[in-house]
Image: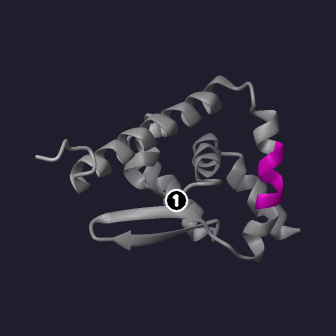
């Protein structure tokens, strides 16, 4: 029961819940998270630290970048059962829909930048 209470305490914070909803199907860099949420980096980083300490998310470093994703453990398996319910409840929530829209735009920009940097967007020059 203590794990369940801890899980609901974590979900009771709006910023942490918004972060988790972004990470459901995505591994994201901290810059993508704070841009999608339109929040300051320190505020997002503080909530990411709480989620990481609670074993809900994990991180990996690639050069200067830190990427976050939902951890896969016995604790988060409970959480993954709740995600579809949360998404159903929030399907008409303006903030949730805006977060998803912003993440989609950021992902598009990221793909376009990667194509440009790799030379995939040039015209053969």
Q: Is residue 34 visible?
A: yes
How is the structure coloured here?
A: one colour
Residue at 81% over, 37% down? 88
View extreme (left): residue: 125
Q: Main secondary structure of the magenta part?
A: helix
View extreme (right): residue: 1
Q: Nearer the viewer, residue 28 or 110?
A: 110
73 sits left or right of 112 in the view:
right
In magenta segment, residue 48: no
Residue 46, how many percent across, how many down? 46, 55
Residue at 83% over, 69% down? 2
Q: Nearer the viewer, residue 108 or 115?
A: 115
View extreme (bottom): residue: 73
Q: Quadrant of the N terminus?
A: bottom right
Asked which quadrant contains residue 91, the reply is top right
19 sits left or right of 65 in the view:
right
Residue 54, how many percent across, how many down? 63, 68
Q: Nearer the viewer, residue 72 or 43?
A: 72
Residue 38, how many percent across, how many down? 44, 34
| SS label for mark 1 | loop
Q: Nearer the viewer, residue 119 or 52?
A: 119
Residue at 58% over, 61% down? 51
Above or below 82: residue 52? below
Residue at 59% over, 53% down? 23
Above or below 48: residue 58? below
101 sits left or right of 11 in the view:
left
Q: Give the class, few, some or many, for how many residues have Cα within 10 Å of label 1's Cα (few <14, many ≥20).
A: some
In magenta segment, residue 81: yes
**Which contiguous range is marked in magenta?**
80-85
Asked which quadrant contains residue 13, the reply is top right
Residue beneath disc 1: 27
């Amino acid at each position: 029961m203590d794990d369940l209470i801890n899980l609901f305490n974590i979900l009771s914070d709006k910023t942490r819940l918004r972060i988790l909803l972004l990470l459901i199907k995505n591994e994201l860099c901290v810059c993508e998270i704070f841009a999608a949420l339109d929040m300051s980096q320190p505020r997002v980083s503080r909530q990411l630290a709480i989620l990481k300490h609670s074993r809900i998310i994990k991180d990996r470093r690639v050069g200067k970048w830190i990427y976050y994703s939902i951890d896969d453990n016995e604790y988060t398996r409970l959480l993954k059962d709740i995600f579809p319910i949360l998404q159903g409840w929030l399907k008409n929530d303006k903030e949730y829909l805006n977060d998803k829209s912003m993440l989609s735009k950021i992902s598009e920009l990221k793909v376009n930048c990667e194509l440009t940097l790799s030379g995939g967007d040039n015209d053969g020059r």
